[in-house]
Image (cartoon, rainbow, N blue to C red):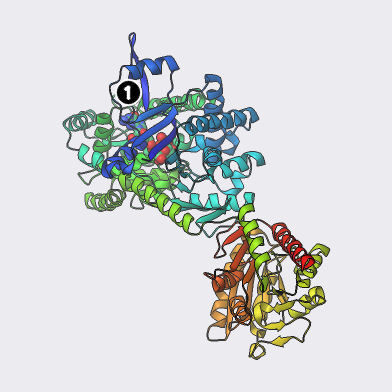
Amino acid sequence: MKKLFIVSNRLPVTVEQQGDKVALRSSSGGLVSAITSYLEHSGRGGFADTVWLGVPGCTEKAWDAAVAQQNSTAYTYSPVFVHWKKYEMYYNGFSNSVLWPLFHYFPSYADYNSTYFDAYMEVNRQFADALTGQLSAGDVVWIHDYHLLPLAAMLRKQFPGITIGFFLHIPFPSFELFRVIPREWQKEILTGMLGADLIGFHTADYVAHFLSCAEHILDVTHDGQNISWENRQVRTDAFPISIDYNLFHTAYDLPDVAQKRAEFSQQCGNRKLIFSVDRLDYTKGISNRLKGYEQFLKDHPEYKGNVVFILVIVPSRDGIARYAERKRMIDEYIGSINSQLGTISWQPVIYQYAHLSFAELCGLYTACDVALITPIRDGMNLVSKEFAASRKDGRGVLVLSELAGAAAELSDALLINPNDIREIANQIYAGLTMEPEEQRLRMEKMQARIRQYDVVQWSADFFFRLYETKHSQQQVEVRMLESTTRVMLTDRYAAALKRIILLDYDGTLMPLQKFPSQAVPSDEIIYLLEEITKDPMNDVYIISGRDADTLHKWLGKLEIGLIAEHGARARKNKEEWVNFDGSDTVSTAHIEKIMQDYTQRTPRSFIEKKQFSLAWHYRNVDLKLGAIRARELYGHLVKQVSGLPLSVLNGNKVIEVKPDFVNKGKVVERLVSGGDYDFILCIGDDTTDEDMFRQLAGIEHAFTIKVGTEPSLAVYNVRSTEAVLSLLQDMALSSARIHQFN
Ligand code: GDG
């Protein structure tokens, strides 16, 4: 039975030393509660076992001793022991001094040290080795976060069919930012993530950034969600992580929470209470938050002595100099606010640099008037969701940074820009003076969202999409024409008595060129086509979107059929060209005008004018601009041709308008029905070639091949035009052999 492997940097347990005894203590992070609740609600997810793999944060000896004393554990833990020096460079180094600042838009804080990167790759390999020893083919692996970006690809190499999900808990930055790191790192990160079947992010913006990076750096294509990568469709999607709603909502009535709430309220007296809690981190916007509070007190002196800000900072990453420095700055700033604005009987900021118990945390969530959450960048921010969920009383106001992922869902918070100090000050005031009824209405809306999509829903959603992705991958599986199938194909070719060979031209026989006029056939192509047409059992057709004149100029001397403009014009072995009935009755003059307009607005795009059709090419245009203009033009043209016998094709870097009564599928239908063929070979690379593949689908003696690794209706895929020529070469040789013996 299959197993589930959860992989995260740290195991969700710590080894605690009590005197000379050691024991395992489970941590209570958001991820653990997500996985635990999901497994509880889904009959263990159908898994025989759940193995959690990560670094234990202790020595092997301490781990063994602690495990030996434990009767049972929530998960099967699989510790990865990393040498501390290596771990330091992987964790404090690459993960937290390169990826963390960069992905949170602090590129100047990043330390582009190549030894960090080497250690990062090495530790990821160590994780991969630890996993491969335990994995079986049907298992499911769920990898978490930025510490393990290259891991999925490492696993995929060894287990090509395995199901892998990856989730990133921090933002994914825009291409302009991502490109600042060395190209090798960019590639390892992106290709590493693409080893997964499903890549999850918190928000749609992060998804878009990842897709744009993959498009620019790896030159892959996507449809806004799926990327074709190494014969697989990899899906990307947004899964805004959530919290255990019930845990926080019901906490309100827990006796120890109620007691803490009473204590904090009593401590504040009649004063209003503002609260915030975060790990110590420059991304959390703690300095700006304090500036905003200070500004608020200056703008509203009536609140001096009547408000208290409880600021809790949880120690984090103190091994990194920048964090220690940040702590010093915050300490000093709080000191200055308290000394300058405070009095003997009133301290404006009450500051704690330590972890809170759950009861204290919920006590503060439910006692405060305003929760002030101002990160400069935050992947999601769970504190904001926990605060909203905990307010069973319907009171309290959330002031939230619009640069936290949570802002996309919690639009009923008072949103602020964390760099706008005056706005923070104004919203503190708005929060403290908000009518109870408005507080209740806003809270209810936020609670409804969090309740609906809680952490169980989040994990269930992720697993559902992961299995769905795997299933659809299997349906449109890219089947590469391997050597064994290729032998079978050439055997069938040799055994056939009447064959038809249908070939697209650009991208199939000739690689795509910068300009269409440059795609003159090579000597090798001419030679192979000549050789194949020498065999009297073969009918060969080039079926292209090209105009008749070009095909005639390049291939007119050969004994082959030429089909131009997707079937609008045809010529059988050196006979006259014939137009498809009615092709010439359609005018495209108004289409040309529109295309000219787009050509002027889109540097390096150009129009290819054919007898009955027009193509607007954007293969040389800047990637982003090309995609935008193509979408725009496509939409524009679709409206223009409505009611006319024309259709708009969205091809490979080309938008084409052609008579709608011709397409390559119809051509193939006509050609194949005109002969008694017992071997049909059809090869193409573009979306317009899918019509041919569709036409031939299900015919036992038809072999359809797509050039490229994108999924297709064709039965097989080959990687490049070279593979096509090599296949034609085999056929030519086979023909030569047959006729030599006859
Ligand atoms: C990363 C991303 C993303 C904090 N202090 C105490 C305490 N906490 C708990 C909170 C909350 C969690 O820690 C903090 O989560 P956040 O989401 O706010 O922030 P990060 O730690 O930076 O988390 C973030 C998250 O991953 C999940 O994907 O949302 O964007 O940066 O649960 O309650 N808990 C207790 N005492 C504390 O003093 N008990």
Quarter of the picture containing the C terminus is bottom right
- List the residue tagged with mark 1: 25
Q: Residue furthest front?
A: 742
- Residue 640 visible here: yes
Task: Give left or right: position of 389 versus 641.
Answer: left
Where residue 587 sits in the image (x, y, percent)? 65, 87
Where residue 720 sits in the image (x, y, percent)? 68, 57
Q: Residue at x 20, y 28 (%)?
A: 263
Q: Residue at x 38, y 41 (%)?
A: 2
In the picture, residue 690 is in which quadrant? bottom right
Looking at numbered disc 1 in the image, what kind of residue is underneath it? Arg
In the image, 181 versus 218, the foreground residue is 218
In the picture, residue 273 is in which quadrant? top left
Q: Total marks drawn?
A: 1
At label 1, counting other C-alpha atoms closer than 10 Å, the crowd grade (few under 14, some 14-19, many 20 or more) is few
Q: Is residue 229 above or below residue 425?
A: below
Task: Give left or right: position of 543 versus 261.
Answer: right
Where residue 224 sits in the image (x, y, percent)? 51, 58
Ligand 1's image quarter is top left
Per the image, label 1 sits on a secondary structure element best described as strand
- Residue 520 visible here: no
Q: Residue at x 42, y 14 (%)?
A: 61
Q: Is residue 321 above or below residue 177?
A: above
Task: Give left or right: position of 234 versus 513.
Answer: left
Where residue 407 sits in the image (x, y, percent)? 40, 49
Q: Is residue 645 above or below residue 147?
A: below
Label 1 residue near ligand 1, CB within 8 Å: no
In the picture, residue 275 is in which quadrant? top left
Quarter of the picture containing the N terminus is top left
